[in-house]
Amino acid sequence: MEGKEEKWGRDVAMRSVFAANGKSWVPLLMGAMPLGVALLTVAACTPVALRAHVGTSCVLSALAFWWTRSLIPVISSKIPATKRGCDLLKRPVRSKIGEADRNVPESLGIVSGVALVCALVLTQVSTETPAFAHDYAAAMLCIVFAVLLGFVDDFLDLEWKYKYVLPPIMSLPLLSAYDGGTRVVPPKFCRAALLETPLGTALDAVIAPLFGGAVDGASGVVDLGLAYKIYMVLLAVFCTNAINIYAGVNGLECGQTYAIACAILAMSAVELGRAADSDNYDATKNHLFAVTLMLPFAATTLALLRSNWFPANVFVGDTFTNYAGMTLAVVAILAHFPIMLVLLMFPQLLNFLYSFPQLFGMRPCPRHRLPSFDPVTGRLRASRVNDRADLVPPHRDSFNLTLINAALRICGPLTEPALATILVVFQLLCCIAALALRFSLVGHVY
């Protein structure tokens, strides 16, 4: 067996500086930096009157991190053999998979999900902030729904057509509890078009009878009415499935989510300080809610990432992708920055658009669109439709349309940890660019 593993070149990736091999400090530094920067921003921007609240959330988030790290090995040892998976990126395509190869515990997102919910409950009980108790309860219900339904999905292995039905069910508590406005402020050039051209009248004629909305003829502000709540559901569907389909590489699901969570945490901390300085009660409440929700979310995701980074000791499963996407959607909706979330999730949006032809049957789509492992070099290469099964005639064979494969086509064959690092760094750069746009151009656009 050892000779076979050497022949497959598995040790090549383990020697990478990006692998969690116990020798390289790069993964630890990469994991600590985003949250470290976000926490420094929180410390610098949090108003004095709110420091006790945020400090309590920080302490409980640290406990949630420790609890997740401690329980993952315990729970993973209890996972039965029937619920363990094979890491397909560490073996040649079409090689026979035996029972001994299914040795990675799956669905360990349940541990971080439960830790997150417990931390949120304890934070609400400890801080006693009735200002957003209603929103907080709705958010926790949505996350609990997402954890439970994701765990069911992991164990029943639901088909993709059912995965589009689950997010609307998860978002029911959010829809029932949402009492915020349904008005949106379009960018300046859109408001000018609505006020100075027949477009405003035409839009009003459409949304008024269908959704009970209206276009303000004086300011150009659009009240979407029921359409706004439909948008909320669609955002939840997008967030959960966008993370789910942008996956397959050790650490990528957790890494992308962790980067987005840290970006939201830093952004909300800055906005919290600004809102408090201007005595804007609603904005202060919204961004305090976002900080309180993102602190334990980032902490528990980091704890799970440590076990899921290459070489992965556990798989996160649909449990994690479900509640991670729902948490991001919930915080964006209740803290009123849904457009900003879409900017932060630019890689996920790009991956979805690039995958569209395969996802919707325009081109052949295999069950697994993962990269292919080269047993000679020990590196990953962009996969083709026929790599794992003969689905189409050879002349119709083509590359799978995923952002992961696109990265491999651009950069060439890479080890798995190097590929994951490139994709997570790309996510971080997109988040930084989105934050720069928000803080530098928002005054010019709106």
Image: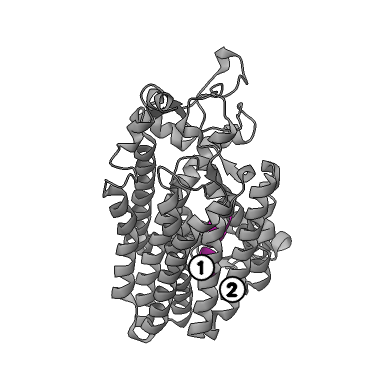
Numbered-mark total: 2
- In the image, residue 87 sits, relative to residue 305, either above or below, namely above
Q: Position of residue 181 (x, y in %)?
A: 59, 72
Query: Any mark on residue 352, and which?
Result: none
In the rendered image, which quarter contains the N terminus? top left
The image position of residue 65, as x and y in percent, is 43, 65
As displayed, is residue 11 above or below residue 154? Answer: above
Q: Is residue 326 magenta?
A: yes
Q: Amino acid at mark 2?
A: Gly
> What distance separates the C-alpha of mark 2 from that of mark 1?
9 Å
Query: Decide: marks 2, 1 in contact (CB < 8 A)?
Result: yes
Under circle 1, the secondary element is loop
Identify the residue at horizontal 49%, vertical 83% (top origin): 126
* The residue stretch that appears in magenta: 322-336
Which quadrant of the structure image shows residue 377? top left
> Most extreme residue toward the right, as rendered?
209
In this rendering, position of residue 42 left or right of residue 120: left
Indicate the position of residue 335 as horizontal and vertical percent values.
Answer: 50, 69
Q: Is residue 280 left or right of residue 168?
A: left
In the visual, does 178 lie left or right of 247?
right
Q: How is the image coloured?
A: one colour
Which residue: 49% across, 46% down?
A: 349
Disc on res. 180: 2
Q: Nearer the viewer, residue 258 or 315?
A: 315
Residue 421 x/y as whole percent: 35, 43
User: Is residue 220 visible in the rendered structure shown here?
Assistant: no
Residue matched to label 1: 336
- Element on which disc 2 rests: loop
| Residue 388 drawn above or below residue 57 | above
Q: Is 359 on the left-hand or right-hand side of 116?
A: right
Which quadrant is home to the C terminus?
Answer: bottom left
Main SS class of the magenta portion in the image: helix
